[in-house]
Image (cartoon, grey):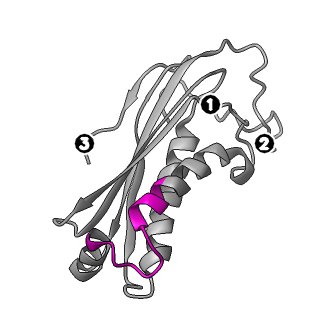
Amino acid sequence: MEPGSTLTHLDTSGAANMVDVTDKPATDRTARAEGSVVMRPETLALIREGDAKKGDVIGTARLAGIMAAKRTHELIPLCHPLLLSKVRVECELDAALPGLRIAAEVRVQGPTGVEMEALTAVSVACLTVYDMVKAVDRGMRIEGIRLVAKDGGRSGAYRAPEA
């Protein structure tokens, strides 16, 4: 655990508990997450050329990530529903992987952070890529999903060490 931190989602008896944010001030909060889908070079070429049978892989993954960020509270039991200000999902072709690098940035002005929304956006975007081209490459790997940075709130800024 981080120095000085506690598990806020547990009550005094150790049971799961939704944190009360009633008295926390609304502040600007941002979180960025990343992940990747590693695939065969031929699969990446299929995506690059726009020849996937299910359609626009990158555009669909981007939209799925945005939609997922907005519904994080429905997927993660103790997350608060948030009125998100901004969700941006970027998908970058990377021949060196080979595959796609996916990043998400989420912003809100509220009493709690958006780390889970950024991580959910990346996760679902990666899963969407897998779903759209699994017929030609079931061996794809989803890797490295992590929080890259967060700003705002009582705990302040966080920057992940370089991977």
| Range of residues picked out in magenta | 49-62
Residue type, label 1? Thr
Residue 55, position as x, y percentages in the image: 45, 73
Position of residue 36 relative to residue 40, above or below, is above
Mark 3–mark 1 Cα distance, whole angstroms, equals: 25 Å
Instruction: Say which residue label 2 marks.
Output: 14
Vertical comparison of 113 with 116: above or below: above
Which residue matches tag 3?
162
Disc 3 crowd rating (10 Å Cα; few below 14, some 14-19, many 20+) is few
Q: Contact, CB < 8 Å: mark 3 with mark 1?
A: no
Residue nearest the observer in this picture, 130 or 21: 130
Alpha carbon separation for disc pair 2 and 1:
12 Å
Residue at the (51%, 21%) spot, across then down: 155
* Residue 102 lies within the magenta run: no
The residue sitting at 64% across, 26% down in the picture is 112
Vertical side of 56 occupied by 68: above or below: above
139 with respect to 128 (left or right):
left
Mark 2 residue element: loop
Q: List x then y, in percent, for residue 63.
A: 52, 54
Q: On the image, numbered disc 1 is attached to which residue?
A: 6
| 77, 132: nearer the viewer | 132
Which residue is depicted at the point 70% across and 15% down?
24
Mark 1 residue crowding within 10 angstroms, few (<14) / some (14–19) / many (20+):
few
Q: At label 2, which amino acid type do we have?
A: Gly
Q: CA distance from mark 3 to mark 2?
A: 34 Å
